[in-house]
Amino acid sequence: MPDESNLYDELDGSQNLCFCAALYGMERRKREERARQLLEQFGLADAGDKPFKTYSRGMKRKLTIAAGIIHEPKILFLGEPTTGIDVASARQVRKLIRDLNAGGTTVFLTTHYIEEAERLWHRIAFIVDGKIVRVDVLKSSINGDGHTTPLLSFAILIAFGAALFGLSLRNVRRKWIY
């Protein structure tokens, strides 16, 4: 998800979602149904027929996330999803992210806000100068039976991080996989 929305100001919310769905090859009926569903889920149903340029920053952020999941991806990458929006919208976005994860979507989040990471995730990787320096499980997010629900297996997460940041897998395995 980009910092600034990549949706079209001249289109309304529903049209933007349908356009994005068409880019993923979704059939017209399915994309219109999915757009209505997402507008409702994101609390934007009343604004769905209003031009995107009239949306508040929080509304734009939510519609941008909706556009990113219209095709129901298994993995979602979010960069600073609550930066620059009001407190109420940030709460709504965090709830939507938790709901997506609970529904089976793996979500990778980049943030400078440790508090945000603690609120949303059970596993955190700290990156300094392009290198993963620590991966940890947050105790606060362990579920009632004492187990975490993995987003991805640890090895896949580390391999992905290594590939993304150009780290040697041999060094990653030696340092972080026990």
Image (cartoon, grey):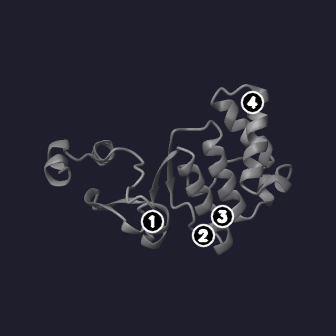
* Residue at the front extreme of this rendering: 145
Marks 1/3: CA distance? 15 Å
Residue bearing mark 3: 92
Label 3: element kind: helix
User: Which residue shows up at 45% across the image and 71% down it?
Assistant: 113
Label 2 or label 3, whichever lies nearer to me, is 3
Say whether disc 1 or disc 2 marks the residue closer to the N-terminus: 2
- Circle 4 is placed at which residue position? 30
- Label 2, on which residue? 84
Per the model, the C-alpha gap separating discs 3 and 4 is: 26 Å
- CA–CA distance between discs 2 and 4? 33 Å
Kindly identify which numbered label has been placed on residue 147: none
Q: Provide the residue designation for mark 1.
A: 117
Instruction: Name the residue: 85% across, 55% down.
Output: 46
Q: Amino acid at mark 1?
A: Ala
Q: Amino acid at mark 3?
A: Gln
Residue 166 placed where, x, y %?
Answer: 26, 45
